[in-house]
Image: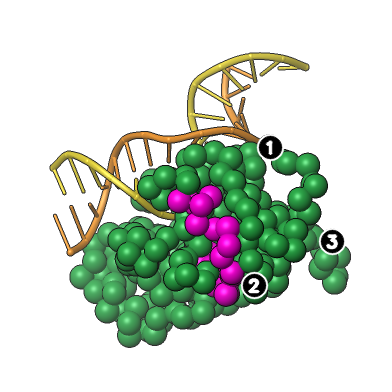
Chain colours: A green, B orange, C yellow
Amino acid sequence: MARVPELPEVETTRRHLAVAVEGETLVWAEVGRDRTARRNHRPADVTERLPGRRVERVGRVGKFIVAELDGDLRWVIHLGMSGRIRLVGESEPLDPHTNFRTRTAGGVEVRLVDPRTFGFVAVWTPEEWAGSTLAGIGRDALDDLPSRNELAAALAGRTAPVKALLLDQRLVAGLGNIYADEVLARACIHPLRGGGSLTPAEIGALHDAVGPVLAEGIQHGGTSLDDLAYLLPDGRAGTYLDRLWVYGRAGEPCPRCGTAIERVVVAQRSSHFCPSCQRR
DNA sequence: AACGATCCCTGTTGGC
DNA sequence: TGCCAACAGGGATCGT
């Protein structure tokens, strides 16, 4: 089953990272795999710029973790498909696929472990930030969700499938494949519906579904944070997977009406929906 | 400009 | 049972 870090996992990671490094000065950094630093001109831009910098605050936009450093630099981390952040002492043995490390003056190491290398670490000047796709990223789906009217304006005239538009981080930042399917399921909208074809009522339902779906994901530890399972007060598995209505459930009954969930490819991604609740 | 397709990766899965 | 091809997906990039 999917273990892709989505917004809830990224937010949980951000919170842990903030506790570990906010106010701390970084003293050392290493790129273990050049591809992980591909968003800088050279890997050395990462390893040379971080040491000596103080981490002012650790924020997030969509699935990008964005830390503000002194010296007007931004330290950006994306977990990609398989990335996770480990916060450990420097003597801790390295996990395989530890593609990036940095260390605080206090001796805490931040490590990005990322087998599939879709994640990245970047350290950008204001000019580099402005020239990156981060400059054009949409508003955060959790903290800064556009209003119904703004969402309607963004969808107006668009012919692309609404699922594809939800995955476009320039429109709204933070929805990935799993949560896009779940949001559409709760709003009773077929993933292949053209973005501009949605009625005001459907846009309202879509808008209203985003917050609860993401909040529930965070509350239940996300879809992939197995490590947190034991921390949950009621002892249930710390996985959101059990709560998914449609994602990965082709052939299983829709929790609303019992109809078998179907799978279709949209925007080169698998999409799951109830053919009865979500009409084309 | 908008849209769809392709590519990058490797651990996991499913079919034979 | 064991092997290997197919699959999974976020986001950059390219062609139309």
Name the secondary structure under disc 2.
loop
Snapshot quadrant of residue C13? top left
Q: Is residue A37 above or below residue A8?
A: above
Helix, strand, or loop for circle 1?
loop
Residue corresponding to mark 3: A230
- The residue beneath circle 2 is A22
Q: Residue at x 41, y 75 (%)?
A: A139
Whether residue A2 is visible here, answered yes or no, is: no
Q: Range of the magenta residues?
A: A45-67
Element carrying mark 3: helix
Task: Classify residue A98 as left or right of residue A190.
Answer: right
Left or right: residue C9 versus residue A171 is right
Which residue is located at x 70 percent, y 71 percent?
A19
User: x and y percent of residue A220 in the render?
Assistant: 71, 68
Whether discs 3 and 1 lie on one chain: the answer is yes
- C-alpha distance separating marks 2 and 1: 27 Å
Kindly report which numbered mark, 2 or 1, lies closer to the viewer in this rendering. Answer: 2
